[in-house]
Amino acid sequence: MLVESLLPLGKLDPGLREPANPLRIEEVATLAPVAEAAGLDAILVEETKDDPYQLLALAAGATSSVGLGTSVAMAFPRSPTITAMSAWSLQKLSDGRFNLGLGTQVRAHVERRFGQKWSAPAPWMRDYIRAVRAVWDCWQNGTRLDVDTEHYRLDLMVPLFNPGPIEHPEIPITVAAIGPNMCAVAGEVADGVRLHPVCTAAYIDAEVLPAVTKGAARAGRDVGEVEICLKPLIGTAPDAETLERVKTTVRERVAFYLSTPTYRRAFAVHGWTDVAREASTLARDQRWDDLPSLVDDDMLHTVATIGTYDEIGARLRQRFGGLVDRVEFSIPVNDENDGARLRALIAELR
């Protein structure tokens, strides 16, 4: 199992990102070497408040061996050619360490934040990835650019805008997914699928793996070529007393996921459809304080993996070891003792 982490290591709640204290762009060059020294397989960034490609350019310049990737960079608001160039540049800068993780975003954001027309996301993502790869093939091998799909028509590449071949042209593409249609697209055209934290072990086994297998079969691929990546929902802390406080925050996060119709399929696998509908009603009525009471201990410990620092590695390995190839995991690293603890956890997960 490969172990990845979102930056910043020193500014993470135990197992959870702290939205009020986001990554500051000027810290990337300092924090990336910390992650590399901790022995992580990859540093990931997500597209929220800063451009992820610029953040990774800073990380690439400050490191030499750790993998680099976008956990989720928005695909549809960007032309495939623009994304192809951002990835191409980062692959050159990092000497072959870049992984392109793409996501779709939901309809409201695509239409009202990015000003794009909405289309069914799974076929759109299939066309998008094929277009990106066609651009790369044109640059690397001199193949004539000729993309003609439902969503893209690309047939122009002049020397001025052609960066030419690079030493490491094989850039992996990972697709963020939760539903079976997107998981199947990942199996068909991507190198990996990155699953949402709400995906439990039972859901991965019952829904994700069959869909990825179906997509791989459509393309005549070996499903073993497709990496299963997961950012599990984790509640962890150095001691049991602190963990009890963390569990309150994790319960609130599970309640939010429970109330979101997009994630209902993952709860349905466990027979929680009715309580998910109740949670959606509470959210619609803005009764946020009432939501956590719907998450009993069985649901909490099924959706989230919870334990102290000494316990969490073994619990994650037991739960996901036979299901996923890559796992995203972080604990705060503020001194050498924290670093040693994280290195031990990484070794245990592997």
Image (spheres, helix red, strand yellow):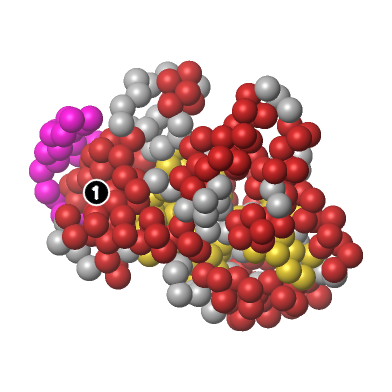
267, 120: nearer the viewer:
267
Residue 2, above or below 268: below
Position of residue 266 measured from the top left corner of the image (x, y, whole percent): 49, 49
Q: Residues within 10 Å of mark 1 (few under 14, many from 20)?
A: some
Asked which secondary structure carries label 1, the reply is helix
Q: Can see residue 207? A: yes
Residue 350, above or below 157: below
Q: Is residue 69 left or right of residue 259?
A: left
46, 56: nearer the viewer:
46
Residue 261, above or below 102: above
Position of residue 34 measured from the top left corner of the image (x, y, whole percent): 68, 65
Q: Is residue 1 left or right of residue 132?
A: right
**The residue under label 1 is which amino acid type?**
Arg
Position of residue 129 measured from the top left corner of the image (x, y, whole percent): 28, 45
Position of residue 248 measured from the top left corner of the image (x, y, whole percent): 79, 51
The residue positioned 22% from the left and 30% from the top of the image is 151
Q: Which residue is mark 1?
A: 133
> Which corner quadrant holds the C terminus?
bottom right
Q: Is residue 243 left or right of residue 327?
A: right
249, 102: nearer the viewer:
249
On whether residue 159 falls in the magenta region, the answer is: yes
On whether residue 11 falls in the magenta region, the answer is: no
Q: Can see residue 44? A: no
Which quarter of the picture shows residue 86? top left
Q: How many marks?
A: 1
The residue positioned 58% from the left and 59% from the top of the image is 232
Which quarter of the picture shows residue 279? top right
Query: Magenta stretch?
Result: 140-161
Q: Is residue 285 left or right of residue 87?
A: right
161, 143: nearer the viewer:
143
The residue positioned 48% from the left and 37% from the top of the image is 262
